[in-house]
Image (cartoon, rainbow, N blue to C red):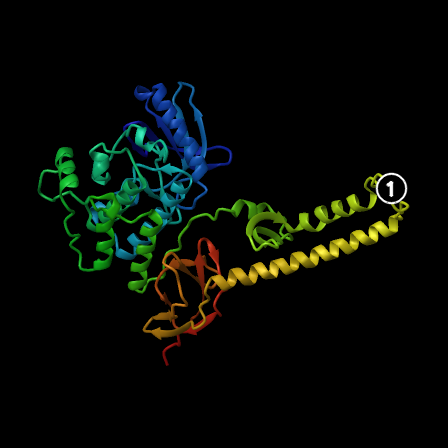
Amino acid sequence: MLGSGGFADVFLYEQNLPRRQVAVKVMLAEVVTSQVKQMFQAEANLMAQLSTHPSILTVYQASVSADGRPYLVMELCSAAIGQRYRMEPLAVPEVLSIGVRIASAVETAHRAGVLHRDIKPSNILTTAYGHPVLSDFGIAATLGEADVTEAIGLSIPWSAPEVLLDETSGTIASEVWALGATLYSMLAGRSPFELPGRENTSSELIQRITKGRPQPIGREDVPARLEQVLLRAMSKKPSNRQRSVLEFIRELQAVETELGLAQTPIEVAMDDWAIATADDPEDRTRIKGVVSIDPSGARRRRRQSVSQTLTRAPTSTVVRESVGSQPSGPGPARRRWSRPLVLAVSVCAVLVAALVVTATLVLVKVSSNSEIPTVRDLSGRVSNSTIVFTWSDPGLQPDDTYQVAVGDQPPSIQHATEFRVDAKEGETVCVTVTVNRDGKTGAPSGQKCVERAGSS
């Protein structure tokens, strides 16, 4: 037995093929009803869809046992985080890293239209390689159904006031609240409204959450800015919280930068990742959202493929003009075109089309890059054991962000014009900064490399 909850037990098993240790979550026989079965099946489907994310627990299999109890076969992970913070609060850098990774998982679920609705420390597990993962989507609901879905198995200490007051069963804002409360708990060693030495019954906690404010964390090593981020996330009014989990992540990254820590990368899949991996690696000429201008000056957007433009459209047009039906009625004598001449005209048309498309590509590239500013004055300096990179604002709009890439690592997203990287003596760190606007990136800055010299 690895653990037990209100609806299921979790056991340690060894799978035969392929041979490995797994965790098997089996529904309790006394709670097996048609409604709970549907909930369990929904969890299996949700976990399967989302568990490709590096910070969401992986599900290997789902089925029904011989006695009629549904079960899930999952990646074996440790529940140490949910137990350790009670005995010894976690270090600030670890909490920030866990926060960014788990919040990335929640943001990914939101983009798939799913609310977790039970974010808390005990639902954050650790893989064998020390990576935090979010588990237990057992009471998850789609964003559209959240307001009409009954909340089952509510975790009071980490539930937002509006959820406890039964104003909603879950929203993006309530997920932001739960994330803030979870990180607060890891830093304070207790849930936000739990008072040591006082009554902490369910009714007492609900009263404090809906009417009071969290007590200060009470740690000198917790920066004031981090506490402000968490208090904002736990604002009573949902409108006063971060507008999205992504905004919450960026504020955590800003705290990492303030502390001189390397930013934990945001782990959110790009919208077109599947298309990109499915395409022929040699085919890198697909145009998306080409802007074309007609003679009247009106602009319109269309989607097309370069290969279609070069092969299908020109060829079909030439064939219609050369070997199509002859015009009726009086006129000059009909002229027959030989096959070689048809082919020659086809080739010419293809070449002309290629030139037109090439010109269009150049036009699109120049116009799109000119709209997004480029960082041109990236500089770096060594400060103790940290390399500090700075640059001037090239003219960002309010929703623009910087993508800072360190070597081959995934880029970090931020609003600040400063980026810090810890470096060992003799280590050289290279950074590139690119502006991101509406999911599109402009031209990258020149790469800046700085070496932290060794002591003489």
Q: Position of residue 244 (x, y in %)?
A: 33, 47
Where's the N terminus, which quadrant? top left
Asked whether 167 or 386 is in front, the reply is 167
The residue lying at 44 percent from left, 26 percent from top is: 63
- Would you identify the image quadrant in which residue 436 lies? bottom left
- Would you identify the image quadrant in which residue 355 lies? bottom right
The residue lying at 35 percent from left, 25 percent from top is: 27
In the image, is 426 to the left or to the right of 291? left
Res 84 seen here: no
Task: Decide: is 314 above or below 123.
Answer: below
- Would you identify the image quadrant in which residue 393 lies? bottom left
Res 172 seen here: yes
Asked whether 105 or 20 is in front, the reply is 105
In the image as oriented, which residue stretches furthest toward the front?
330
Q: Position of residue 413 (x, y in %)?
A: 39, 58
Where's the C terminus, which quadrant? bottom left
Task: Decide: is 80 above or below 37.
Answer: below
The residue lying at 29 percent from left, 42 percent from top is: 173
Q: Secondary structure at mark 1?
A: loop
Q: Position of residue 108 (x, y in %)?
A: 40, 44
Which residue is labeled 1 in the image? 330
In the image as oriented, which residue stretches furthest toward the bottom?
456
Q: How many marks?
A: 1
How many residues crowd around disc 1 within 10 Å: few (fewer than 14), some, or many (20 or more)?
few
In the image, is 282 to the left or to the right of 49? right
In the image, is 309 to the left or to the right of 67? right
Q: Amino acid at mark 1?
A: Pro
The residue lying at 49 percent from left, 65 percent from top is: 444
Asked whether 102 or 369 is in front, the reply is 369
Q: Position of residue 304 (x, y in %)?
A: 61, 48
Task: Decide: is 55 above or below 416.
Answer: above
